Each structure stands twice: as structure tokens, then as C-alpha cells.
Image: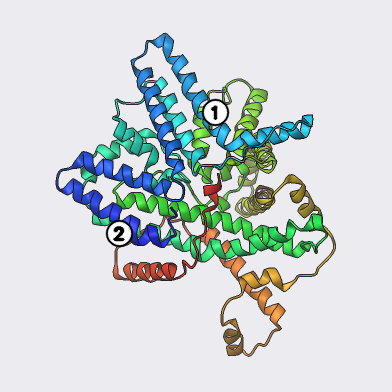
Amino acid sequence: MQFNSYIFILCFLPLALIIYFALHHFGKDKWAKAYLLGMSLWFYGYFNASYLAIICVSICVNFLISRRMANAAAKNKKGYLWVGIVFNVALIFYFKYYDFFLSNINTVFRTDFVLRNIMLPLGISFFTFQQISFVVDSYKGETKDYSFLDYALFVSFFPQLVAGPIVLHSELIPQFKDKKNWSVNFDNLSEGLILFTRGLAKKILIADTFGNAVDFGFSKAALYATGENALTPREIMIVMLAYTFQIYFDFSGYSDMATGLGRLFNFKIPMNFNSPYKALSVADFWKRWHMTLTRFLTNYIYIPLGGNRKGKVRTYINVMIVFLISGLWHGANWTFILWGVIHGLGQCFNKLTHGLYVKICDTLNKLKTGRLWLFVLKVVQWCVTFVFINVTWLLFRADSVKQFLELIKRLFVPYYYLGDEVLEYFRIPKIRYLFALIGANPSEHWTLIFCTVFIMLMALILVLAFPNNYESKKKRNVWNLVGTCVLFVICVLSLGKVSTFLYFNF
């Protein structure tokens, strides 16, 4: 089920909220928890009931392993740990990478293994990583004697189930048991509705607008092999920027909606998105983008590998391993693997030059015009980082590495034509009336160029000049109420067709 659908907004969510709090009100606390679990499973299995078997088996096996580990002798705990890790990795490998692995074997060794065309279960990357963290924490003795109901709800709680954040047991399960969270809290309801509505607006009104242009651009790029007209350099630039903004507002919108939904139930879901396009380096970007994935990779892979404790060379190797896993986690395609490797190299470059950067900053601080030069340095850093992110997002979105290289190659072709097809997706309705008011009468082509540049600039201002929804104050006053209601109505009326969140694919 999608957050941005009529069935969710008008049926599922009201039913989930009203009956959950009603059960608590009448003292049926376990029933309330069981009801929320049942609703979460309905949410997950809405489009494909077979998904339920996968997540239920995964939950049962991981809970059993963690319980056995808790009662096992110290010498046997590591065995259970490895059983848990192997089970989870095998589960995600089979559903996500089995065909990719076989197809590459067929290509390299000219074999003819039959691909199974296995359908990828929604959110398997998220709930599998979440359960790996639980198994590892159980091995460390950091998990408490949770009931099966608490554990199952922790894994399947619908706001964070399909696209994160990757929540730790210590962040969510204690909240299920806190009696203060069992009754309606109107402050949390208000904050939750504001966050959900803003996230919905980001998805429907902004991300999907850019997404239409992106889909057109890559559908045209897919025709290169057939000899059809290719995208021009300017069109590639527009499509690349469009995807940069699409994935930002899509994932930011989902993160806001997930957090808002959690607040409606009085639960605090960890921050997962912190204005990543304000980053001044690749390292800074990964502290802001998909923060809970970064935390998981750091705590459960990078640190166990040795982190930065075993010398510089080993540190760089560990960084590359982590980013290779990050790329592979996002999908079974060489584009994701190469994307992870490139970001790993960027992270290594940051570590390698950090000492030099600190010295430069110290030197500039001693100058009379030091503040000005520090500002210039930060501007240059931002520009380099933003260009790096744009180019790597193009690789991330490309159907293949070959397609990405073709797009990059064409980006530098001295051909300046810009067609109206891609610009049409940025048309602002009734823009001609605005031009008439100021006495202007540009051609249709220049009108579309103006609309495109205007929308791109507005998107850039939104991501750079405004605080994100985690930071902004959500005042409960008449203006906020009216604004939220109007925005919510606009979003619901704009639902036309349900578009999938990009991170549902991972």
C-alpha cells in the first residue's frame, strides 16, 4: 500500500488510528498492539499477499535465533550469530541478487543457467538489515526479553517498513510499552499531520513533476541502440538535474510522512534525512542522506571490520567495502555497484585530504580577509560536491553502465539544440497571463525555458535556503491549521494516479 493513495489516506489510516487508541482506551492493551501488527501486515501484503509469507518467516526465524542465543552458553552464541547472519543474507541474496548472479555467470563463462525472474519483495532490504542489527545486538546481550508481539511489531510497523528508516529495537520497542503513548496526544496529532502533509506535498507536487521529465528522458535514452534521436547535451543536463531533485523530494517526502505517521501514534521515529544537498563533501552528504543506513553500515560493518583502528590502508579498504555493500544494497545492477565504489573513492579522498583542509582553514582564519576566503572555499566545496552528486545520481538512475557512459559522452558534444518535449513537463499553467501583466510576449520555446529554469531554481532554493521539516517549528495556530488543510486538500485532489516511492525499489 502506498502512503499517497486514497485507500491509505481515507480508509487505512483512520481505521488504524481510531481502533488502536479505542482498544487502549478500553484497557485492551495487548489487543491494541496485536491490531497494529495486523494492520501493518495488511499494509505490507496489500498488493501481493505472498509477501506476507516471506516477512512472517523472516520474523519468526530471527526471533527464534535471538531467543536461543539469549539462553545459550557463551561458547555457542557465536554459532547462533552466524546462523542468523547467514539466514538473513541468504534471504536477501535469493530474492534480490540470485538472477543477477546467474546472469553474470552466464555472461562470463558462456553458460546457460535458467533465470528465475524472482519478484523482489517490498522492503526486504530494510527489514532484513533491521533484523540483522537485532541479531547482532542479541549476541552482545543488548536486547531485552521482548515478547514475540513486540518484536513482530518492531519489524513490521508500517510507517518504516517498506522504505525505512532502519530502526533499532532500543528506539521503538520501549515506546510500545510506554503507557504515556497509549492515549491520544493532540500535540503529536498536530505535529504528525503537519509532517505527513508536507511530505505528501513534496512527493505529489514536486517529486512527481520532476519524475515525469526523468521518465521521458530515460525512455528516450533507451532508444539509442535502435538509432533513434538521442538526447542533446542540454536535455541531458535538464534530465540529470530533474532526477537529482526528484530523488531528493521523493525520499525526503517519504521520510517526513513516515515520521509524521509515527507521531500520530505517539512514536518517535529516528531522523533519516537532514538537508543532504547542503553538504560540503561526500562525507558530509552521507551524514545527511539516509542517515539510518549510514549508521547501520558504520556500526555493523565498518567498525567490526576494524574501522580506522588498524592503520590508514586498512581504513581505506574498510571504507571501500562499506560503500561497495551500500551500492549493492540499493540494487542488483552494476550501476549501483559502480555508484557505491565512486562514493567510496570520494569518501577516501575526503579522509586523505582532511588534514590539508584543516591547515588551509587555519591559515585563512589568520588573514584579515579570512572570513571572505573561508566563504569562497565553502562555495567551491559545495559546487564540487553538488556536481559530484548530480553525476553519480545519473549513474544511479541509468539502466546500465553503458547507458550512463553514453549520456556522459554526449554531455560534452558541442550541440546546443534544446527541444520542447522535455521542457513541456515543466510548463506552468496560465504563465502567459503573467507575461501579459508585465507586457512581455516571448515565444513558446522561451516560455518553456523560463518555466523550467524557474522551477529548477525554486527547487534549489527549497533545498538550500529553508530548514528541513525536522528542524522547523510546527506551531499550532490558525494559520498553520488553515495552511495544512489547504495543502492536504490540494494533494488529495492531485492524487490522479498513485506513483511509487523510489526507495520502494530497493
Q: Nearer the viewer, mark 2 or mark 1?
A: 1
172 up-or-down from 300: above or below: below
Q: Which mark is residue 90?
A: 1
- Bin the neighbour count of mark 2 within 10 Å (Cα to Cα): few under 14, some 14-19, many 20 and up: many
For the point 29% across and 70% down, the residue is: 478
SS of the residue at dot 2? helix
Q: Residue at x 73, y 31 (%)?
A: 105
Q: Position of residue 218 (x, y in %)?
A: 69, 58
Q: Residue 423 vs residue 96: left or right?
A: right
Mark 2–mark 1 Cα distance, whole angstroms, equals 42 Å
Q: Give residue 351's quadrant in the image.
A: top right
- Residue 193, placed above or below residue 181: below
Q: Is residue 368 visible?
A: no
Can you name the residue that lies furthest to the left here? 26
| Residue carrying label 2 | 190
Q: In the rendered structure, are the residues bearing label 2 and label 1 in contact, judged by CB atoms less than 8 Å apart?
A: no
User: Disc 2 residue type?
Assistant: Ser
Using residue 205 as the reference point, say whether residue 154 is left or right of it.
left
Res 225 quadrant in image: bottom right
Q: Secondary structure at mark 1?
A: helix
Name the kind of residue labelled 1 in the image.
Ala
Question: Residue 443 at x, y = what percent?
Answer: 71, 83
From the top left corner, tell me how far across and down residue 491 is, in percent: 44, 67
Q: Nearer the viewer, residue 268 or 325?
A: 325
Q: Is residue 345 above or below residue 87?
A: below
Lower sequence index among marks 2 and 1: 1
Q: Where does the image place residue 206, in percent across and percent down from the top left?
A: 53, 64
Q: Residues within 10 Å of mark 1 (few under 14, many from 20)?
A: some
Residue 115 visible: yes
